[in-house]
Image: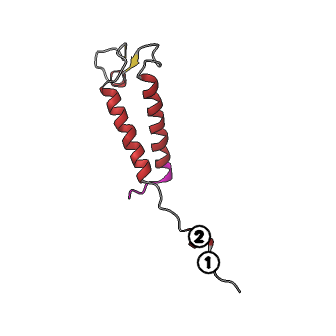
Amino acid sequence: MVELNDNVRLVLLVGAAALLVFELLNMPGMIGNGEKLFLIDLITDSGMDHFRPDTGFSTQDIVAVLLIVVMGALYWISQEDDLDWEALLGDDDDEE
C-alpha cells in the first residue's frame, strides 16, 4: 500500500481531472477553434506549429490517457485503510 500525504493525493486528483478535461476538449479541436493544440510543440522548439488541424487520436493523447490512468491509480491505491469505528467510538458494552 502506498501512503501519500493528503495534499499530494489532492494534487493527483485535481491534476488527473484537469488533464482529462483538457484532453476531452482538445481532441475534437474545441480549444483551438477547430485545430488541435500539441503541447510538445508548444514547449519545445520542434519547428512545427503547435496548433494544427490534425484532430483525432494522436501520440499526445495516448501519453495523456496513460498519465490520467497512473495518477488515478496512485490516488486510488493511496487511500487510507478503513477506520476501526468501534475503537474510535469507544466500547459500548460497558453497562453499569
As drawn, is 29 to the left or to the right of 47? right
How far across and how far down the image is residue 16, in percent? 44, 38
Tell me whether the residue at label 1 lies in contact with that at label 2, contact meaning CB atoms closer than 8 angstroms: no
Instruction: Decide: is 7 above or below 88.
Output: above
- Identified at 50% across, 46% down, the residue is 10
Q: Secondary structure at mark 1?
A: loop
Residue 20 pos. (x, y %): 44, 33
Task: Give the label, 1 or 2, closer to the camera.
Answer: 1
Q: Quadrant of residue 34?
A: top left
In the image, 45: left or right of 90? Answer: left
Name the secondary structure under disc 2: helix
Q: Position of residue 53 (x, y in %)?
A: 37, 12
Residue in view at x 45 percent, y 16 percent: 32
- Residue 9 versus residue 47: which sits nearer the camera? 9
Q: Quadrant of the C terminus?
A: bottom right
Q: Is residue 71 magenta?
A: no
Dot 1 amino acid type? Asp
If the image is split into quadrants, where does the N terminus sit? bottom left
What residue does disc 1 label? 91
- What's the magenta region? 1-7
Tell me what residue is drawn at x 30 percent, y 15 percent: 48
The amino acid type, in three-letter code, at marker 2 is Leu
| The furthest residue to the bottom | 96
Disc 1/disc 2 C-alpha distance (Å): 9 Å
Q: Is residue 6 magenta?
A: yes
What secondary structure do most residues of the magenta stretch adopt? loop
Q: Is residue 55 above or below residue 68?
A: above
Total labels: the figure holds 2
The residue that mark 2 highlights is 88
Tell me if residue 64 comes above or below residue 7 in the rendering: above
